[in-house]
Image (cartoon, rainbow, N blue to C red):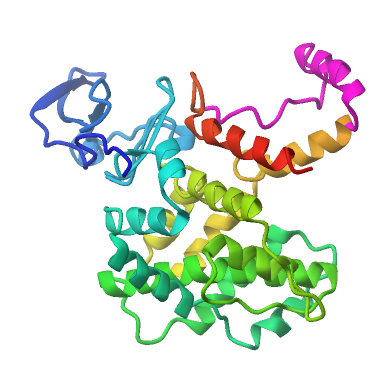
Amino acid sequence: CPTKSVGMTEMSGAQEFATLTLPGGQEHKIPVYRGTLGEDINFLDIRDLYAKTNSFTYDPGFTCTASCTSGITYVDGPKGQCLYRGYPVAELCAKCDFMEVAHLLLHGELPDKKDKRRFIEQIESEYMVHERFKDFFKVFRMNAHPMAIMVAATGSLSAYYHDNLDWSKPDDREICAVRLIAKMPTLAAMAYKGHIGEPVVYPRAGMTYAENFLHMMHATPTKAYKVNPIHARAIDKFLILHADHEQNASTSTVRIAGSSQANPFACIAAGIASLWGPAHGGANEAVIKMLNEIGSVENIPKFIDDVKNKRSGIRLMGFGHRVYKNYDPRAQYMRILCNQIFEQL
């Protein structure tokens, strides 16, 4: 089993105070909290700042602001650390599959064999989407952007799942989370099939989560698709590496939309819209465009030279998340996966 770091919980109670002196001499005491990991960082609780001092903080981009406490993910950029519920993400990649990690993120603990089987059965029971969804994808142009389709499709799930659910109840929130995990590969595969003009392939229970996704993407009614185990493993580990990343732009967007108690599927659609941007998840798409623009190996030196000389419009993409000042720990396992796939080409 992976080794869990000690103390991956929420912040400890305030035992210290900082004093803020405002223009005019007014002083305001601010409770100081410390995380149970990364104890060299202080958290200043300013929730009563406006009420008591008629002052606001100014922090564009939330660069110095946490909107909640969390025991889910811990990121330490300078040290190159990324933990899910206290477990190093690279170690989870090496010893777990995506279903186990999804259970870990939702419930706080890795599942035993019985809990894992029950969780997989929950996911498999929600793979299907309403049959009318097939018609939904017909309205998009063949060259429609995949993210535009996913924003619309995910938001449309709120039209199917809105009755008899109380989002204030943990059980109902869990049902929603399970449905999102289960239906995302189905929607993505349906969007892809619509783009290439092939009929939809339905999900199948009994395959792994990654195998089912590849099956839906590449099988056809006339030809069975044999899933390459190395490709399935790469997809599975890729999903683990991107399962969570603390309070990023899309997570913050979902939380802000959800603060109005909107339908969770609509909130996730808002998060996907945020993910679309080139400064966030869209950076992956920017890497593909960059590689296409480079074209061939002999063009690499000129491209690198243009990057170093800061030529207008030329940027080096795909070399790590900017939060990591040392080394992106997710790249450690990604390198192994890439080498395994390249060896088969």
Q: What residue is at 72 percent from the left and 44 percent from the top? A: 285
Residue closest to the far left? 15
Indicate left or right for 88 with 226 as reference. Answer: left
Rendered position, 144 above or below 157: above
Q: What residue is at 35 percent from the left and 53 percent from the top? A: 105
Q: Is residue 151 visible?
A: no
Q: Is 296 a magenta residue?
A: yes
Q: Between residue 31 and residue 287, name the one nearer to us.
A: 287
Q: What residue is at 41 percent from the left and 69 percent from the top? A: 120
Locate the C terminus and report the quarter of the image it occupies.
top right
* Quadrant of the rendered image containing residue 226: bottom right
Q: Is 54 a magenta residue?
A: no
- Residue 197: give x, y in percent of width and height: 85, 73
Q: Is residue 175 visible?
A: yes
- Residue 180: give x, y in percent of width and height: 48, 68
| Residue range (magenta) | 295-322
Locate the N terminus and report the quarter of the image it occupies.
top left
Across the whole image, how many numbered discs are drawn on residues?
A: 0
- Residue 59: give x, y in percent of width and height: 42, 32
Rendered position, 220 above or below 244: below
* Quadrant of the rendered image containing residue 304: top right
* Quadrant of the rendered image containing residue 54: top left
Q: What residue is at 88 percent from the left and 16 percent from the top? A: 302
Q: Between residue 242 and residue 121, name the one nearer to us.
A: 121
Q: Between residue 98 and residue 272, name the one nearer to us.
A: 98
- Residue 139: give x, y in percent of width and height: 78, 78
Rendered position, 74 above or below 265: above
